[in-house]
Amino acid sequence: MHYDTIKNEHNLPHDPFKAIVAPRPIGWIGSRSKAGIYNLAPYSYFNAIADRPHFVMFSSVDIKDSVKNIEETGDFTVSLATEDLFDHMNGSSVPAGSEVDEFELAGLKPQIGKFVSAPFVSEAAAALECKHWKTIDLPNVDRKLGKGNYVIFGQVVGIYINDKFIKDGLFNASAARPLVRLGYMDYGVVGSENTFSKNRPKLGKDGKLEAVKEWDGVYR
Ligand SMILES: Cc1cc2nc3c(=O)[nH]c(=O)nc-3n(C[C@H](O)[C@H](O)[C@H](O)COP(=O)(O)O)c2cc1C
């Protein structure tokens, strides 16, 4: 199979795109409306995109409450969606009106950020506090109708970590067990059973690749 995506010629019952670009991390976006209503929703068109300063992005199909709130208030959070919180994360994805507090709906306790005015999931192993930098409207959007794809970029100005998940000075992601989104209705979980560590090699004096046995903290 080798097909034209514009013509959507895959002839499969479902578009395989998201099953190919998988796993994707889940950005569990917390925000607050101008009226002060808390909002929470998962977004898997999400990723970390830069260090120093740290930046994240997520993409919304149509202008949803998260986009509206973030553009109005300038603040949002990203809580880590983990295996133990799956039902809460899934519950928070229900399309509810902007008057509905999805923290309450999903049975979660909001905590206002230390550096931003948006709430994060207090039960989460970690959360990022973000300031809206800009929104990029992808081609063919109609802002008047709120239709199309909108990419929100945010600078991470604060990070919360539940100290329980710090081990030997490292964030113990395998213990937190983050959820990842696959295609269709499929998910995965990151745990010690499916992760491993391996150093990147360096370039030796002879121009050949040289193994680095002990990681020295340098991301080469
Ligand atoms: C795991 C998961 C990932 C999702 N990823 C996205 C996404 O990347 N973009 C999007 O527009 N909607 C996504 N959704 C759907 C939104 O969560 C849903 O439309 C939600 O109601 C939006 O809430 P809001 O209006 O409060 O922002 C996802 C849902 C789930 C369960």
Image (spheres, grey):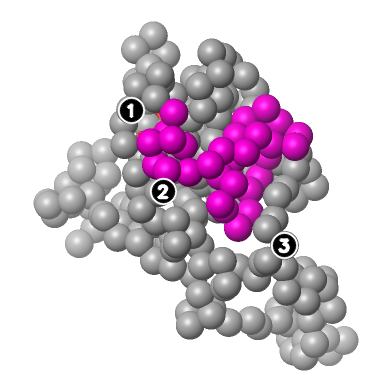
Q: Is residue 166 rendered magenta in the image?
A: no
Q: What's the distance in space between the residues labelled 2 and 3, CA to CA?
A: 22 Å
Disc 2 residue: CB within 8 Å of ligand 1? yes
Is 150 in front, or is 10? 150
- Amino acid on which the number 2 mark rests in the picture: Met
Horizontal and vertical percent position of residue 84: 45, 62
| Furthest residue toward top | 144
Query: Is 89 placed above or below 203 here?
Result: above
Mark drawn on residue 163: 3
Horizontal and vertical percent position of residue 83: 44, 63
Q: Residues within 10 Å of mark 1 (few under 14, many from 20)?
A: few
Ligand 1 picture quarter: top left
Is 130 in front, or is 210? 130
Disc 1 residue: CB within 8 Å of ligand 1? yes
Q: Residue at x 34, y 12 (%)?
A: 145
Q: What's the distance in space between the residues labelled 1 and 2, CA to CA?
A: 14 Å
Query: SS at mark 1?
Result: loop
- Amino acid on which the number 3 mark rests in the picture: Asp
Residues in magenta, as a range = 101-130
Query: SS at mark 3?
Result: helix
Q: Residues within 10 Å of mark 2 (few under 14, many from 20)?
A: many
Query: Is 6 placed above or below 99 here?
Result: below
Residue bearing mark 2: 89
Which is nearer the N-term, disc 1 or disc 3?
A: 1
- Amino acid on which the number 1 mark rests in the picture: Ala
Q: Is residue 30 left or right of residue 140?
A: right
Q: Are marks 2 and 3 in contact (CB under 8 Å)?
A: no
Which is nearer the N-term, disc 2 or disc 3?
A: 2
Q: Quadrant of residue 53?
A: top right
Residue bearing mark 1: 96
